[in-house]
Amino acid sequence: MEFISTRGGERVTGAQAIVQGIAKDGGLFVPASFPAVTRAELEGMLGMDYPERAAFVLHKYLDEYDEAELTEALRAAYAQFEGDDPAPLVRVENGMYMLELFHGPTCAFKDMALTVLPYLLKKGCELTGVKEQILILTATSGDTGKAALEGFKDAPGIKIAVFYPEDGVSKMQKLQMCTQDGENVDVVGVRGNFDDCQTAVKRMFRSEECNRAIAEKGYRLSSANSINFGRLAPQIAYYFSAYLDLVSSEQIKPGDEVDFAVPTGNFGNILAGYYAKRMGLPVGKLVCASNKNNVLTDFMASGVYDCKRPFFKTMSPSMDILISSNLERLIFEVSGRNAQLTAERMQSLRKTGRYDMRPEEMMAIRETFFAGCTSEDDTVECMYEFFSEYGYPMDTHTGVAMHVAQKYEKYREDNHEKDVRPMVVVSTASPYKFPQDVLYALTGNDVKDSFKGIKRINLLTAMKVPESLKALRYKPMRFKGVLSPDKLFDEVLKFLG
Ligand SMILES: *Cc1c(COP(=O)(O)O)cnc(C)c1O
């Protein structure tokens, strides 16, 4: 399958799209068309295990990759997860399910793709004849950084540098990243928020000067952020798998529609759900849940994307984002794949901080998406209520999704929408990854120390503590550097040596 840039012109293979990360014109790579999964194929996937299902979905896009080899690579990636299903679907009450995507090495859903991306990239270099070493530059709001570091540590021919907002990630996330081992990694704190990190990294990608200097050192740039299609593809698979699990357990009949609620930041996770729907999966609504940084909620309501607004630090730091990169892929689709218009809008976003949509485009978006946001208090209340009622503890990001899912159910009731559709809430992080805020939500108690928080939550919930988080306590801090955004390129050159 071929891939095209959302801003026009470039046409590449899937392997090229993954190796390059981003199009030369700054656009994002999207498939030339959406491959269909037929009803018969969907039923055929019922008997497959998770790696086989994922390989089937990925191969629809990446047909130059060998499917058997892909299956083995996925199997190896998901063997690093705790438990035997990397994406278990848990029924919590009638019609409400949690899709748990946090059983990987870093306890957040980013592992679903970032354990696989190293293989996709390495194989992609082979398929496209790329001989240089790869330099991965990653901006992170907390979880991508650690997952990428774990995925790529000590990978031959690859170096990875991660940039996180100095005060914009949780203590646990910072600890995870700054204690990272591996000889090919660099971790740098940035003065600013996630958007500053992401903008600085995107600037390096676009800059000819940066690319030239990096090439002189024998490297070429790639990205582990969700702008890379190699991040998106493995995420499409779990929407299929959740659906198939509902069919297998006879909660639904094949063809019934299912809603998904997704805690959203950079719009990568929920966009994967949209891709699944476009491939033919019977998805009803995709509920786009935001925290206090509700630029997407306002966008869906008004048709104006306006990121000129205050930035809030919240308990769900991985969603503290005002510029949702992957939205570009959605607006490209609803514009009728108008690359010129998409390029103009992205330019307007860069220059003025906003762009406008047409009414008919917004109608198309609202047909598939319902958007809502939560205050910090609402999230805490929702996490508390859900734990008291069902004994199910969730992390702060998932709490946002749950609250907006409940708002959506209420909206449907108020509008007398009678057809019953199961709701799958996508659970993106382990509660143990944000122990202080989770403990506060569940009990009203504050603890100063993250590990004390972990212990208390464990006593309260009896949920198993992930080994990787337990181990953190005794690891030395390796990375302490903090830089301003304009100094990142100097750091990169130093890192390459
Ligand atoms: C990254 C992240 C999100 C947001 O996902 P996007 O793909 O950026 O929308 C939500 N929750 C957690 C725990 C995350 O790590």
Image (cartoon, rainbow, N blue to C red):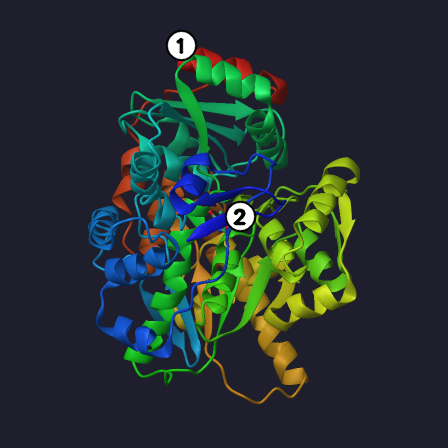
Q: Amino acid at mark 2?
A: Ile
Q: Position of residue 470 (x, y in %)?
A: 29, 40
In this orientation, which residue lies closer to the viewer: 289 or 159?
159
Res. 443 in view: yes
In this orientation, which residue lies closer to the viewer: 464 or 335?
335
Res. 127 image quadrant: top left
Distance (Cα) linking label 1 and label 2: 34 Å
Q: In which quadrant of the rendered image does the C terminus lie?
A: top left
Q: On residue 220, which mark appears?
A: none
Q: Amino acid at mark 1?
A: Gly
Q: Position of residue 417 (x, y in %)?
A: 61, 86
Q: Nearer the viewer, mark 1 or mark 2?
A: 2
In this orientation, which residue lies closer to the viewer: 305 or 386?
305
Res. 91 image quadrant: bottom left
Q: On residue 497, which mark appears?
A: 1
Q: Position of residue 345 (x, y in %)?
A: 73, 47
User: Residue at the location (37% across, 41% down)?
Assistant: 452
**141 to the left or right of 160:** right
Which residue lies under the disc numbered 2?
Answer: 4
Label 2: how many Cα within 10 Å (few below 14, some 14–19, many 20+): many
